[in-house]
């Protein structure tokens, strides 16, 4: 992805988020220079990979295969392992009309996916084989706002604003905006996007950046190189 495209997506996403009454935290608006200057006081932001996350999954087709995310908070794996403390994470996502977030599951993370506003949120679901791999013949059961709902293999569930689904680590899922763009909330256990995503097809999690212009704000995936 070109950095200029990422800058434009950030501006559009911020306006979309604000249209629903949400405002991102102050560190969202720091320039790269401000992030460098404040890195000592913002070490938890950097270590937790909080902030902007815009991906085309390395395929160069963002409008068709991509996702906007902003990680608002992320707990500590050590707390999760000991069974107490900051064991949770929270994100805001924007899934554009017919923009696919590809079929995947998580090894560790359980998550509530919540339609926060806009169009319908479409989620295609499959269960797992015994070894956790994708099985096109497996259905399952998910919780939708506290109510059990069985799904057939490949069934697409639609969620209106205010509705949500709870996905457990073995639930294979892909999602998109149905009929328009949708603002999505994610509340989950501690999140590590570098290790916790199992995609059905071999695919990258992060975009490769063409630095055609300077970044307005750093992506979380930039921290390692830009702040080293």
Image (spheres, rainbow, N blue to C red):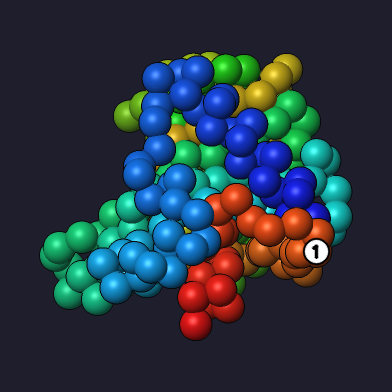
Q: Residue at x 67, y 46 (%)?
A: 7
**Nearest to the observer: residue 185 or residue 113:** 185
Q: Is residue 208 above or below residue 24?
A: below
Q: Quadrant of the N terminus?
A: bottom right
Name the spot of residue 77 as percent of width and height, x first.
Answer: 30, 72
Observer able to see residue 170: no
Horizontal relation, residue 189 to residue 192: left or right = left
Q: What residue sits right under mark 1 in the picture?
A: 210
Name the spot of residue 139 as percent of width and height, x first.
Answer: 61, 44
Name the spot of residue 20 as percent of width and height, x first.
Answer: 46, 19
Q: Residue at x 20, y 70 (%)?
A: 79
**Nearest to the observer: residue 150 or residue 165:** 165
**Nearest to the observer: residue 205 or residue 28:** 28
Horizontal relation, residue 176 to residue 73: left or right = right
Q: Is residue 175 above or below residue 31?
A: above
Q: Residue at x 34, y 65 (%)?
A: 38
**Nearest to the observer: residue 67 or residue 6:** 6
Q: Is residue 13 above or below residue 19?
A: below
Horizontal relation, residue 100 to residue 182: left or right = right
Residue furthest to the left: 84
Q: Residue at x 17, y 68 (%)?
A: 83
Q: Is residue 219 above or below residue 143?
A: below
Name the spot of residue 204 as percent of width and height, x first.
Answer: 72, 67
Horizontal relation, residue 148 to residue 141: left or right = left
Observer able to see residue 209: yes
């Amino acid at each position: 992805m070109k950095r200029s495209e990422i800058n434009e997506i950030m501006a559009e996403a911020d306006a979309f988020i604000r249209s629903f009454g949400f405002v991102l935290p102050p560190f969202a608006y720091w320039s790269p220079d401000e992030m460098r200057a404040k890195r000592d006081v913002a070490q938890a932001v950097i270590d937790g990979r909080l902030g902007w996350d815009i991906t085309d999954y390395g395929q160069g087709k963002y409008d068709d295969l991509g996702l906007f995310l902003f990680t608002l908070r992320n707990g500590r794996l050590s707390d999760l392992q000991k069974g107490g403390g900051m064991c949770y994470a929270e994100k805001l996502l924007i899934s554009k009309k017919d923009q696919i977030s590809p079929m995947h599951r998580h090894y560790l993370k359980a998550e509530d996916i919540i339609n926060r506003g806009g169009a319908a949120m479409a989620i295609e679901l499959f269960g797992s084989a015994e070894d956790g791999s994708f099985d096109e013949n497996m259905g399952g059961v998910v919780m939708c706002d506290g109510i059990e709902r069985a799904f057939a293999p490949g069934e697409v569930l639609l969620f209106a604003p205010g509705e949500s689904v709870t996905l457990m680590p073995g639930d294979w899922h892909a999602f998109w905006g149905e009929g328009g763009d949708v603002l999505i909330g994610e509340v989950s256990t501690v999140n590590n996007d570098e290790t916790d995503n199992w995609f059905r097809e071999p695919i990258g999690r992060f975009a490769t950046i063409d630095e055609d212009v300077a970044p307005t704000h750093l992506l979380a995936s930039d921290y390692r190189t830009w702040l080293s």
